[in-house]
Amino acid sequence: TADNKYLKLTLFSGESFENIRQNSGIRNNAENIPYRREIFETKEMMIDFDSEFNRYDESILKDQHVSKDILQLTATIDSVQKVVEIRGIEQSKDMVSSQFYQIKGTPIENPKAYLSASNPTTNETNISVDSIFYSLSQEQMEEAVNYTFQNASSVKDLIDYNKIMLEEASYYLRRHQIELHRKFTLSFACLIFFFIGAPLGAIVRKGGLGFPVVISVLLFVIYYIIDNTGYKMAREGLWEVYQGMWLSSAILFPLGLFLTWKAVTDASLFRSESYIKLFDEFRLLLKNRKLFSKKK
């Protein structure tokens, strides 16, 4: 309709059925359900269809990886990668200076110099933590253990927080890297399927349409499984992005070259007679080896 609120359908030569009980609220048992039947030559129906038909605001997807070209993706990857590196260096420096090398909350810039100044006759490599701990009283031991447990819990919470902050930027970076590689892997996949499909059409000369279609669908399913697996591995950071995105191409491209070579050399790849002949030759070779061994 003109106001974009309803969808108008014009129906010809049909029948309509309507359950009166559901529409009017009449209660009947399951064996007696009233309904209305209508036979029509022409009928118009109005269906709620409030789609507004407004153009999607492009600014919403402005910062998303799917809406960027190669230059924009490259610029974003460079900037976000620097942010990730700087954030990781700052977190590591903070952890080392404020958590590991400190005495009662005071950071120690040079631990070796501190140990030498506090006890000049003691080398830091000869300090035994166990001997120091067992030299304390029972109350001091309990206090030290509680303090250590609280300190370890606070450090763990800080590490989890830093991990979340770093993982958010890393995930954003990986999505842009994946999208950048996808622009090339999808195009290269078309080339791979050309090297697979064209030789199959030349090699499979008999059997009609069924056998080539089965092989093509099977190869596409294999490609989809490998590509989806590599994508998820790259997205979660388990593999490098280039490894996950180019996994399917690295596996299927050699297959395409092999099929192309077989088609060029006019090899009988899908003829059962060739495999039966090869099996007979292999069996004969084993038989001759056994006879030769017995003679020796």
Image (cartoon, rainbow, N blue to C red):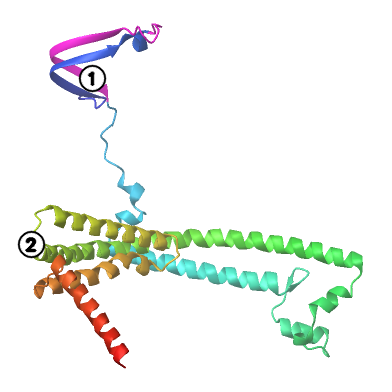
Q: Quadrant of the C terminus?
A: bottom left
Q: Does the stretch in magenta take in 138?
A: no
Of 159 and 185, the residue lying toward us = 185
Q: Position of residue 269 (x, y in %)?
A: 15, 69
- The answer to whether residue 92 is above or below residue 115 is above
Q: Quadrant of residue 283?
A: bottom left
Residue at 55 percent across and 72 percent down: it is 89
Under mark 1, the amino acid is Met
Q: Is residue 259 visible?
A: no
Residue 157's quadrant in the figure? bottom right
Q: Which residues are magenta?
A: 25-48
Residue 207 in the image, given as x and y percentages of width and height: 10, 56
Residue at the extreme front: 295
Asked whether 31 falls inside the magenta stretch, the response is: yes
Density class for disc 1 (Cα within 10 Å; few <14, some 14-19, many ≥20) is few
Q: Which mark is residue 46?
A: 1
Local packing at callout 2 (Cα closer than 10 Å; few below 14, some 14-19, many 20+) is few
Query: What residue sits 11% from the left and 62% below the top?
Result: 204
Residue 226 location (% of width, % of height): 33, 61
Image position of 239 with respect to 296: above or below:
above
Q: Is residue 64 left or right of residue 151?
A: left
**Which SS class for mark 1?**
strand
Q: Amino acid at mark 2?
A: Arg
Q: Earlier in the sequence, mark 1 or mark 2?
A: 1
Which residue is label 2 attached to? 205
